[in-house]
Each structure stands twice: as structure tokens, then as C-alpha cells.
Amino acid sequence: MTAPAYDDGNIFARILRGEIPSHRVYEDEATVAFMDVMPQGPGHLLVVPKAASRNLLDADPAVLAGLLPVVQKLARAAKAAFAADGVTVLQFNEGAAGQTVFHLHIHVIPRHEGVPLVAHSGAMEKPEVLAENAAKVRAALAAL
Ligand code: AMP
């Protein structure tokens, strides 16, 4: 089945345009990263290219090529910021695969030995906790 066209009213497009607040930790000319408001673990963040695409399937390969080094940088920073043992990187394509926001994004989730992930799109985190976690990631990025 053909996927619907990109809809620029999606919540990440609105965050990118500054219409909705987010806890931003990183920005460059092509990419933004901010904290996931329903984290699957402390420090869960999203890496979002500014270019419009629903997901990996319709993305420009040049955008994808630029995205992975940024994901690596954020994964290193998140691991350091939360003294994690590892980092889970996730990405979903279309509703059947678990995608709920239809602007390409990569999940970066610090992991600790023996601690399972919280459910996807579960409980909303308190803004003060997200702000504190964002500050930790920014500090870790600055120290990389
Ligand atoms: P996906 O299923 O990959 O599309 O995941 C979308 C993610 O976006 C989920 O983990 C949500 O918790 C997260 N999310 C939804 N709305 C917001 C928002 N306004 N700011 C930050 N993260 C969000």
C-alpha cells in the first residue's frame, strides 16, 4: 500500500518551526535533537533531520548520510551523561511498525545493565525532569 504524503502539520515539524516547545539538546544546519516527552528510559532523546520526510522509506539518501554521524554524537553524549552501559538506537517506519509521529526521527536511549525499556509512547515525563536531563546531555556534548 502507498504511504500518505508528508504532512507538515505533524508535531515534529511544528517543533522544528518553533511552534511547540521542546527540550532541545542539539542543533546544526540539518538536524535538531530534543528530549522525548514520554521517555522509554532516562535520557531518551530524538534526533530529527530538518528536511521533510515521513520516515526512512521516503528520505533523501543524502539526508540519511548526514544523520548517522549526528546520531553517533548524541549516543556518545547520552551514554556519558547518564553513565549508561549501552545505548539503544531505534527507528520506526509507518504505523504498522510502531511509528506514531510521521516526520523521520531516530530514538537514542541510554541503557543500564538489567533495566528494561519502559513502554513506547507510555507516560509523560515531568517538564522539570526533562529539563534536567536535557542539561546533562548538553553538558556531555560540550565535553565530548
Ligand atoms: P515513533 O513511534 O517512533 O513515531 O515515536 C514518536 C516519539 O515521539 C514517541 O516516543 C513519543 O513519546 C515522542 N513524542 C511525541 N510527542 C512529542 C513531543 N511533543 N516532544 C517530544 N517527543 C514527543
Image: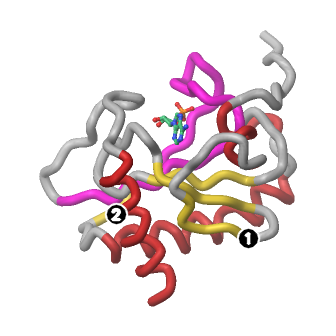
Q: Is residue 88 shown to the viewer in this render? A: no
Q: What colour scheme governs how the chains and residues are painted in the rendered image of this protein? A: secondary structure
Residue under the image location 24 percent in, 67 percent down: 85
Classify the position of the N terminus by image quarter: top right
Residue 105 higher or lower than 135, as above or below: above
Q: Amino acid at mark 1?
A: Asp
Q: For residue 132, which numbered disc appears in the image?
A: 2
Q: In the rendering, at what x and y percent does residue 90 appear?
A: 49, 45
Q: In the rendering, at what x and y percent does residue 115 appear?
A: 16, 49
Q: In the rendering, at what x and y percent does residue 36 appear?
A: 46, 45
Task: Give left or right: position of 13 versus 117.
Answer: right
If you read the primary sequence from the N terminus, does the residue marked by circle 2 or circle 1 appear first?
Answer: 1
Q: In the rendering, at what x and y percent does residue 24 appear?
A: 56, 60
Task: Give left or right: position of 47 versus 88.
Answer: right
Q: Is residue 134 shown to the viewer in this render? A: yes
Q: Amino acid at mark 2?
A: Glu
Is there CB contact under 8 Å for labels 2 and 1? Answer: no
Q: Magenta segment: does it hold 46?
A: no
Q: For the residue labelled by badge 1, is the local secondary structure a helix, a strand or a loop? A: loop
Q: In the orientation shown, which residue stands out farthest toward the left?
A: 114
Q: Which residue is mark 1?
A: 28
Q: Give the crowd class for mark 2: few <14, some 14-19, many >=20 residues within 10 Å.
A: few
Residue under the image location 36 percent in, 43 percent down: 39
Q: In the orientation shown, which residue stands out farthest toward the top?
A: 1
* Magenta stretch bounds: 89-112
Residue under the image location 13 percent in, 52 percent down: 114
